[in-house]
Amino acid sequence: EDKVVQSPLSLVVHEGDTVTLNCSYEVTNFRSLLWYKQEKKAPTFLFMLTSSGIEKKSGRLSSILDKKELFSILNITATQTGDSAVYLCAGYNYGQNFVFGPGTRLSVLP
Amino acid sequence: DSGVTQTPKHLITATGQRVTLRCSPRSGDLSVYWYQQSLDQGLQFLIQYYNGEERAKGNILERFSAQQFPDLHSELNLSSLELGDSALYFCASSVDRELDTIYFGEGSWLTVV
């Protein structure tokens, strides 16, 4: 059965800290890995990673995929209170199915 | 705004009842996905439709059913509701092409009392 595991499940940091969120996956016919940010309601898309070793960046956020070890990390530098959210990782396979992990709840304190 | 529209936003109903949740995908998107998110639970995939046909099925209960209509909007029907069905139900859509992603609606909050 396909599964996605995220760690830690919960994280509390202070503004300015750097955090690393982990995602490991076992997805049959894996195509890509996606990261979403969920604040109050709908998850919003952050990154889609299909190739190993190529870092994707968006401002203070960056992510990389390791297809050999079947994991991805999401880094957030110089965290701000607005980064407080649940970060979801999802594996996407060629069957057009998205398998989501449980999420990492990040709380950034002022 | 993702372009995916879900109605109603909030719904409170009694056990044993039946409700219908509606989703309009982004313009041009052919695939619709339904997810359930309970408190402290991750997103649970329920079902996917592509251009009117069921493509993939996840952990969807027999009491639940869905369909996608010719105009590509989708409905999720939940019947014989139980307290445990209280959750946030998300609809998402995608164009369904290479290297695509899915875009979520705001969700429908269902509370069963």
Image (cartoon, coloured by chain):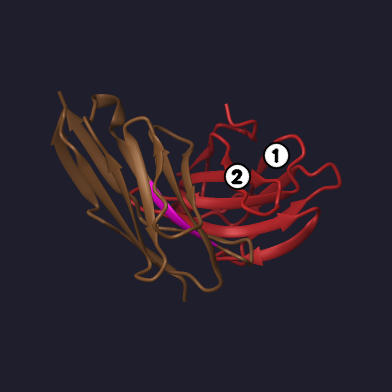
Chain colours: A brown, B red
Chain name for mark 1: B
Quadrant for the C terminus of chain B, please.
top left
Q: As displayed, is residue B32 above or below residue A30?
A: above
Q: Does residue A91 belong to the magenta stretch?
A: yes
Which is nearer the eye, B41 or B13? B41
Name the residue rendered at 82%, 48% in the picture. B69
The percent coordinates of residue A63 (x first, y second) are 36, 47
**Mark 1 Cα within 10 Å, few/some/many (few <14, many 20+)?**
many
For the stretch drawn in magenta, the main secondary structure is strand
**Callout 2 secondary element:** strand
Region of the chain picked out in magenta, as a range: A88-92
Q: Which residue is pictured at 63% across the width and 61% down the height?
A: A96
Q: CA distance from mark 1 to mark 2?
A: 8 Å
Q: What is the chain identity of the residue bearing mark 2?
A: B
Measuring from the top left, give residue A85's x and y in whole percent.
32, 36
The location of residue B88, given as percent across then percent down, is 48, 43
Q: Specify whether residue A14 is painted magenta.
A: no
Q: Label 2 belongs to which residue?
A: B91
Left or right position of A37 against B92: left
Dot 1 amino acid type: Pro
**Residue ranking furthest to the top:** A110
Q: Is residue B13 left or right of residue A55?
A: right
Q: Which residue is mark 1?
A: B25
Task: Say if labels 1 and 2 share a chain.
Answer: yes
Contact, mark 1 vs mark 2 (Cβ under 8 Å): yes
SS assignment at label 1: loop
The foreground one among B8 and B102 is B102
In the depicted structure, whether residue B62 falls above or below residue B95:
below
Q: Earlier in the sequence, mark 1 or mark 2?
A: 1
Q: Position of residue B28 (x, y in %)?
A: 77, 39
Q: Amino acid at mark 2?
A: Cys
